[in-house]
Amino acid sequence: MLAELQNISKNYNQPGSDIHNIILNQISLQIAEKESLAIVGPSGSGKSTLLNILGTLDQPTSGKVILNGIPVNSLDEKKLATLRNQFIGFVFQLHHLLPQLTLIENILLPVLPVSDKVQQKMAIERAYTLIKRVGLTKQIHQRPLQLSVGECQRAAVVRALVNQPRLLLADEPTGSLDAKNAGQVGQLLAELNREQDLAVVVVTHSMDLAALMGKTYRLTSGKIQLILP
Ligand SMILES: Nc1ncnc2c1ncn2[C@@H]1O[C@H](COP(=O)(O)OP(=O)(O)OP(=O)(O)O)[C@@H](O)[C@H]1O
Ligand SMILES: [Mg+2]
């Protein structure tokens, strides 16, 4: 398995009381290599929480996250950061590109900390190939404010992939886009999933985006259920 959640629960204590809000209740999920899946569910159902736990940005109250066969709770902060940087790419609803940097500077940010010069050169080459792939070659010296939101989101997808992760996690990647741009970004994610050695997990309210993924799960009342196919 590429990634696995085992009996993941997440509770929040209500401030000033001993009431626990159970957000995720004993969730188990397996993600195979090259798989693509969507997670849908009502607002507040815990989709982002689940994705952040899978991406090791948040910790579960109980349960295990296993990435590439490694239980992440067995790793210290430094090893976990290295695994996260090499193994996972993130795309969020708002692209989080830095306004003062050009598109190419934003895209190459994750490549700067790569200490191996050969690896770094390969990542830069991959960045240019992906930029061409998503149709942004002409825009590389423009800053985010000089680009459309759709273009910025495509750049954010490229940035997430320059270190060649095996797992792409996207939280509402089309949430701030109009229908045309949302369709383009959705298609792009589906195509990259097929072309590259890349599993994709998207959290979304859009059934159109979910339909582009191989499987769709629904999260409600702390439980996850396969609804498609
Ligand atoms: N730090 C926190 N402290 C307390 N409660 C929290 C915290 N973070 C999230 N929650 C609660 O957990 C629940 C799930 O939040 P989450 O952001 O995962 O939902 P979501 O399904 O992604 O919603 P949306 O579709 O609106 O993005 C919400 O009820 C939220 O209020
Ligand atoms: Mg969310």
Image (cartoon, helix red, strand yellow):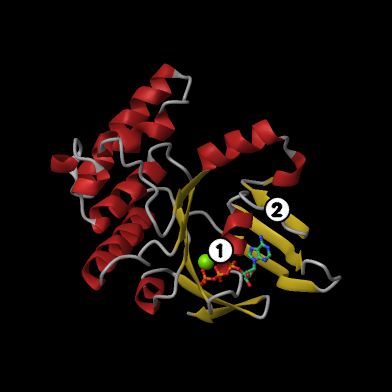
The relative height of residue 209 versus residue 154 in the rendered view (above or below) is below
Q: Position of residue 193 (x, y in %)?
A: 38, 56
Q: Residue 59 carries which label?
A: 2
The amino acid on which the numbered mark 2 sits, given as a three-letter code, is Gln
The residue lying furthest to the front in this view is 16
State whether label 2 is within 8 Å of ligand 1: no
The relative height of residue 191 versus residue 44 in the rendered view (above or below) is above
Q: Where is residue 212 in the image (x, y as percent from the top left)?
A: 36, 70
* Residue where numbered disc 1 is placed: 48
Q: Work out whether residue 3 or residue 136 is closer to the camera in this orientation and state it.
A: 136
State whether label 1 is within 8 Å of ligand 2: yes
Do the numbered discs 2 and 1 sit on residues whose CB atoms are within 8 Å? no
The residue lying furthest to the left in this view is 138
Rendered residue at 76%/41% (across/down): 74
Rendered residue at 34%/65% (across/down): 176
State the quadrant of the N terminus: bottom right
Q: Distance between the residues labelled 2 and 1?
A: 12 Å
Badge 1: few (under 14), some or many (20 or more) residues near its Cα, within 10 Å? many
Rendered residue at 39%/61% (across/down): 173
> Which element carries disc 1, helix, strand or loop?
helix
| Dot placed on the residue nearer the N-terminal end, 2 or 1 | 1
- The answer, for residue 202, to whether it is visible in the render is yes
> Which element carries disc 2, helix, strand or loop?
loop
Q: Work out whether residue 199 or residue 46 is closer to the camera in this orientation and state it.
A: 46
Side (left or right) of 98 relative to 69:
left
Side (left or right) of 80 relative to 186:
right
Badge 2: few (under 14), some or many (20 or more) residues near its Cα, within 10 Å? many
The residue lying furthest to the top in this view is 117
